[in-house]
Amino acid sequence: MTPRERLRSKIAALQAKTEASGCTEAEAMAAAALAARLMAEHDFDQAEIEMTEATAADNSTRTTNRTTWRDKLSAAIAYYTNCAMLIRCDRGDILFVGREPGPDIAAYLRDVCFRAVDRALREFKTTPFYTRRRKLSTRRTAAADFVDGMVLRLTVRLAELFKPVRNESARQEAKQALAKREPNTVPVVLKDRKERYAGAGSAGWRAGADVGLHHGVGGSAAPFAIEDRS
């Protein structure tokens, strides 16, 4: 934990000291005053204090600045969980920032979706559609079209799942909090690619319908499923 993170945690703990939590009125007032002073001295604001963060491993090998399907899917997950996202190449991870429990859900969804895409792609590579292509270049194109189709389907389903809780104001607050925590960032434009093999894209779209997700946050075993709506 960095010094700033420790300070933020201390301020949050001070803010939690209220009469309702068992403090006397005097103790609660003293804690609130100290929290306000620390926030002013160290340039914190209320939105930043209430923000949480979570990380997910970035297992991709980045040799260029080109965006990948992993970046697009991560960005979609961040958007629908009201989070801001930062790819930290120096640490080999992706940081999600937002109001609790958004970041934890985002990190969980990202790991589950990535595993599902990797697994489905391995299966696709055993199909005749893929194996009958003799050139490495055409195989790579077919695989990319398959993944694009699957990512698109997952994105559509995420949009449906999170529609009731999508909040643009919360997302903008998350982006502002991330900008304060990580000021030296470079924006990246997510570029689309042109599909060549419609059959591969359709196969990916169908594979995206088979991914089942569970909440997996806070120890809850309650289902958090993306249902097939085809």
Image: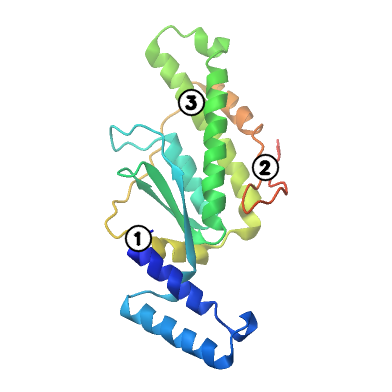
Task: Give the structural element (helix, strand or loop) at label 2.
Answer: loop
Query: Residue 201, can we see it?
Result: no
Q: Quadrant of residue 201?
A: top right
The circle drawn on residue 2 is: 1
| Placement of the N terminus among the 4 image quadrants | bottom left
Q: Position of residue 54 (x, y in %)?
A: 48, 53
- Give the alpha-carbon distance from disc 2 to disc 3, as whole Å: 22 Å
Residue placed most toward the observer, 147 or 6: 6
In the image: residue 1, left or right of residue 215 = left
Q: Is residue 153 above or below residue 103?
A: above
Upstream in sequence: badge 1 or badge 3: 1
Q: Residue at x 47, y 57 (%)?
A: 53
In the image: residue 30, left or right of residue 185 = right
Q: Quadrant of residue 84?
A: bottom left
Q: Is residue 92 above or below residue 127?
A: below
- Give the alpha-carbon distance from disc 1 to disc 3, as whole Å: 42 Å
The circle drawn on residue 226 is: 2
Report the amino acid beneath label 1: Thr
The local crowd at label 2, few if under 14, some if 14 to 19, many if 20 or more residues have their Cα within 10 Å, is some
**Residue at label 3?**
145
Upstream in sequence: badge 2 or badge 3: 3
